[in-house]
Image: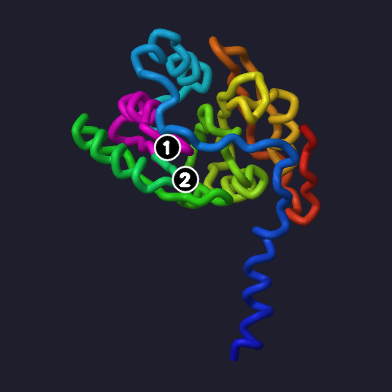
């Protein structure tokens, strides 16, 4: 019985094994909090990102790597009761703390999903906008995660990545390298805009790729 099951298990595992690891440093997760929220509000990053993405009532927005929920707490009131924020993280404690925070704030349109380093595990064809805010450089398997994210996106969805223009080991991501990695798994670049600090890179689903053909970009 075990011998008969082995080929099936290998087949099921093959898609995950097909993706290369990044040819650069991956920053370690040091905290669910990027900075104190008052300072972030004063910097205006979230307001600018939300405005540039045109996030509006009724949409479903995935906050991937939600951490302490800075964006979740600001997007949920905008999408409103007919919309939804999917707060996703790979650390259950972060999700538990964020759930308590949203309940205290009276937000009833937030759903919580525990993902993995290679798969966000979001509902299929459900997401209008996927946010990856100051965390892309911490993703251990970016090619696999981005590839698996595609199944959760609506046809006209966008993914929005906010990061700093510096090396990944210093908690940033050079623009050119980011674009190379995201395009490698079948996304098209829509725009890159400077923020204070950092930048906002927006992508949309492009031509699907065969996982076995994905090559790691060199940093």
On the image, which quarter does residue 187 sit in? top right
Compared to 61, does 117 lie above or below? below
Q: Residue 76's spot in the image, x, y percent?
A: 33, 30
Span shown in magenta:
59-86
Q: CA distance from mark 1 to mark 2?
A: 7 Å
The kind of secondary structure element at disc 1 is strand
Q: Residue 176's spot in the image, x, y percent?
A: 75, 25
Q: Residue 178's spot in the image, x, y percent?
A: 69, 30
Between disc 1 and disc 2, whose residue precedes? 1
- Asked if disc 1 and disc 2 are in contact, CB closer than 8 Å, the reply is yes
Residue projecting furthest to the bottom: 1
The residue positioned 55% from the left and 12% from the top of the image is: 197
Compared to 189, does 8 lie above or below? below
The residue positioned 36% from the left and 41% from the top of the image is: 94
> Would you say 55 lies left or right of 143 here?
left
Q: Which residue is mark 2?
A: 126
Compared to 2, does 80 lie above or below? above
Name the mark on residue 60.
1
Q: Residue 67 colored magenta?
A: yes
Q: Residue 82 colored magenta?
A: yes
């Amino acid at each position: 019985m075990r011998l008969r099951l082995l080929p099936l298990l290998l087949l099921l595992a093959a898609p995950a094994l097909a993706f290369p690891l990044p040819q650069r440093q991956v920053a370690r997760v040091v905290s669910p909090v990027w900075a104190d929220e008052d300072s972030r509000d004063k910097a205006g990053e979230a307001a600018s990102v939300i405005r540039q993405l045109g996030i509006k009532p009724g949409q479903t927005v995935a906050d991937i790597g939600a951490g302490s929920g800075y964006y979740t707490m600001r997007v949920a009131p905008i999408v409103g009761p007919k919309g939804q924020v999917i707060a996703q993280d790979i650390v259950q404690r972060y999700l538990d703390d964020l759930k308590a925070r949203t309940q205290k704030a009276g937000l009833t349109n937030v759903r919580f999903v525990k993902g993995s380093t290679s798969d966000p595990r979001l509902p299929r064809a459900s997401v209008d906008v996927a946010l990856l805010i100051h965390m892309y450089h911490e993703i251990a398997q970016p090619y696999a995660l981005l590839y698996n994210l595609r199944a959760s996106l609506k046809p006209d969805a966008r993914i929005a990545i906010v990061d700093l223009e510096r090396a990944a080991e210093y908690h940033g991501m050079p623009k050119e390298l980011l674009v190379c990695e995201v395009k490698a798994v079948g996304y098209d670049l829509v725009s890159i805009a400077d923020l204070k600090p950092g930048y906002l890179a927006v992508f949309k689903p492009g031509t699907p790729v065969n996982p076995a053909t994905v090559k790691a970009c060199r940093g």
